[in-house]
Amino acid sequence: MKSDNQKYSVLDIRSLSATYGEVKALTNVSLSVRRGEILGLIGPNGAGKSTLIRVLSGILKASAGDVLLNKQNITSYSPAERARVLAVVPQARQLGGAFSVEQAVLLGRTAYLGFLGKPGKLDLEKTYWAMDQTSISHLADRKLAEISGGEQQRVLLARALAQDTPVLLLDEPTTHLDLRYQASLLTTLKSLVEQENLTVLMAMHDLNQVSSTADRVALLVDGSVYSIGNPEDVLTPDNIKATYHTEVESIKHPRSGKSLILPLM
Amino acid sequence: MINRSFLVVTGLLVLAFVLSIALGAVTIPPGNALQILLSKLTGAELSGSWPEYFETILWEIRLPHTILVALTGAALAGSGAAFQGLFRNPLADPYLIGVASGAGLGAIAVMSFPQVGRYLIPMGAFLGALGTIYAVYALAKVGRIVPLTTLILAGVAIGSFTSAMTSFLMLVSDQMVLQAMSFLLGGSTVSGWEPLKIAFPYLLSGMTLLILSGHSLNVLQFGEEQAQQLGLSVEKIKILIIVAASLTTAAAVSFSGVIGFIGLVVPHVIRMVWGGDYKKLIPLSILGGGFTLLVSDLAARIVMAPRTLPVGIVTALIGAPFFLWILRRAKREVFW
């Protein structure tokens, strides 16, 4: 943030805590996401990954601490202002089935449209571009209810891309996808991040996907950051055992050289 | 926007409108009815060969009644569509969140004071509806947001409460029981041009707001969280839509009584035929609601002529089986 402009923190999370009623969901979380990087967010179920995304996107209010988005407190953004900087890719489930793929992606432009939602030329261009980038152009007129889960997840990614934001938050985008769609979604995402210099925070389940996709990894457990850093430094058998309570072995991927996590069974 | 769906529904509405001003205890041939209407509107000389009382019936009774019925149906169907979109529930309608019962209670409360005058009935309905929204909203609020599930539960509870209050009011002031009964069954309590003049501004502004809310309702179909993440000010928009739909409902209830099922059936049929895009669904429901209630009202006037049935009986006879049919269908397939 001081000198190296290329590496400044787009998202700066400082001593953040959040609760659901009486239940503490996040406790004193501090981490920052730098411009142009993919920060993978991992941790066992209930660690607070989705909660963090909900706080960052303004759904849940923090009980303590601050989130700075482009050096400005997240609470000072209106929903529309925030949606022009930060887009969320939720898990695909129960999409409004009555809409066509194109209509759904166009709703990514909501923050730019007026109350009446009448799209202009730029809105349509961004919509078509986003569908093209995610290879769903051929589905434009299909209803959401008629397409597969993998295609729906692509629609949600396209909708976030149409939002035209420098920051993307993804909540376990590969959870409901089969292997082919998982790989192609992550490949698409990674090339978009490079091409558009996007800043990405991505909650994930699959440790090996994190290892191969993320530039850095934050390991959450019980609402706190257990470890953060390069994938090979965070995804160690000791860390995994301490947080997931599972014995694993780490080996090198024969081609990429990245860490592979193998559960010992 | 102008496409076949609008032409079809507008055509049906116009047809029902003409039949409604022509038919009744006294039949005025539709041609004559149109001629009288045109000459009245343009101020041209009447050149027809019809009895003079045709003009009186048409201008003083049928036309204001027909316009009021059309607007009432439009209001109920439009607000029904909006509530369904807001709750993302195909079974939602103005009755679900207690607004119609609240409006009914307000109207009956005014009726139980005969000295107050019947033209204050709409004020009572508005206050009843707004009081209901306020109570339901306050009850349903959890922290800073209003989850739709608690909103619906609060609506059902408050609706039962206001219905009980209404029954109580009817029992303690027996001189108004008949009037109130007819009102609750959906029989108009007032006629002539006067109620139209009072109701029109509310109906027009409420329905205009609902039509303009189509885009916001579309965004809300992805859930409140996603809508907020897409940049919609969800809480503000929800209040706007609730107020617009409730005022529209109250205006309709206060002049036409408590008419059920229009707000449920009409948007449903429109959705099945032309899809769930709220930018189209709301205006089409408004037009279709006018048509449907005109036809129901026509049936209510003709079946036992010269006696007139409360139109609420007709809509319930058609609507309740339809409601059950939707339930059966909804169990078998998810078309939402």
Image (cartoon, coloured by chain):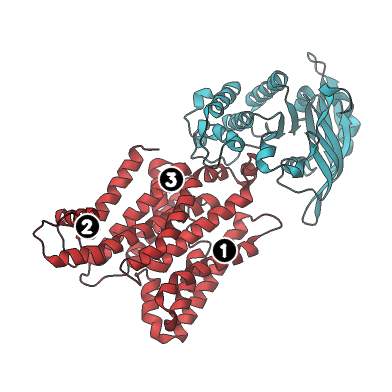
Chain colours: A cyan, B red
Q: Which residue is mark 3?
A: B281
The outermost residue toward the right is: A238
Q: Chain of mark 3?
A: B
Give whichever of discs 2 and 3 has the lower sequence position: 2
Q: In the shown orientation, is residue A118 left or right of residue B141? A: left
User: Would you identify the image quadrant in which residue B26 lies?
Assistant: bottom left
Residue at 34%, 70% (x, y): give it: B187
Residue A172 shows in this picture: no
**In the rendered image, residues at marks 3 and 1 fall on the same chain:** yes
Q: Nearer the viewer, residue B149 or A71?
A: A71
Nearer to us: label 2 or label 1: 2
Residue B63 shows in this picture: yes
Q: Nearer the viewer, residue B58 or A221?
A: B58
Answer yes or no: do the residues labelled 2 and 3 have beta carbons within 8 Å?
Answer: no
Q: Secondary structure at mark 3?
A: helix
Q: Position of residue A68 (x, y in %)?
A: 80, 38
Q: Which residue is mark 2?
A: B40
Residue at 58%, 62% (x, y): give it: B153
